[in-house]
Image: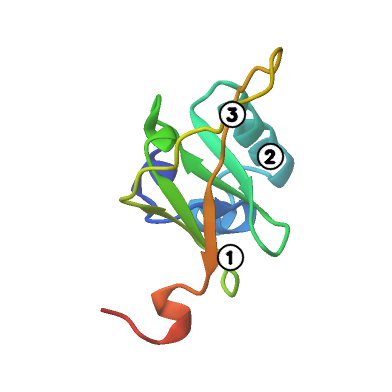
Amino acid sequence: MQLLNAAPTALSHNEIELALGAPAIDRVTLYRVLDWLVESGLAHRNTDVHRVFRFSASVAGEHTTHIHFRCEHCGGVFCLDAAPPAAPSLPAGFLLSRMDFDLRGRCAHCTGKKQ
């Protein structure tokens, strides 16, 4: 959790494994721990443009108040300081349980235009 909390962007399983160090935890156990964190609501799991799962720490309601930018080059996921659009009107009998809004393109690092 400390690693996920400190990470500026969502991390892949491999990035987490490398950051923890070789003997810290075996690969299968890490997958199980990450799955448990997601099921418990302590972490988010999203798939990047390369179809790799990326994990980030979760704070109750945190990701419902802004949108995300997904870099199509490096796979990074960045939280933006912008409110998501309002949910559309749904037909009678429909119940909205989740709404995701992602912008896609290239991040500043991948475009070489850091500010």
Residue 29 percent coordinates (x, y): 68, 36
Q: Nearer the viewer, residue 9 or 68?
A: 68
Going by the numbered disc 1, the residue's amino acid type is Gly
The residue under label 2 is which amino acid type?
Tyr
Q: Position of residue 65 (x, y in %)?
A: 37, 36
Q: Is residue 57 left or right of residue 38?
A: left
Label located before the other in sequence (3 or 2) = 2
Q: Estimate how packed mark 2 is, as few (under 14), some (14 to 19) or many (20 or more) residues with alpha carbons within 10 Å.
A: few
**Which label number is shown at residue 98?**
3
Q: Give the residue number, with chain letter if any, for mark 2.
A: 31
Tell us which disc is closer to us: 1 or 2.
Answer: 1
**Element type where label 3 sits in the image:** loop
Q: State which quarter of the image contains the C terminus.
A: bottom left
Numbered disc 1: secondary structure: loop
Closer to the eye: label 3 or 2: 3
Position of the N terminus by quadrant = top left
Sort mark 1 into few (<14), some (14-19) or many (20+) by Cα contacts within 10 Å.
many
Cα distance in 3D space between marks 3 and 2: 24 Å
Q: Which mark is residue 75?
A: 1
Question: x, y (%) of residue 58?
Answer: 44, 33
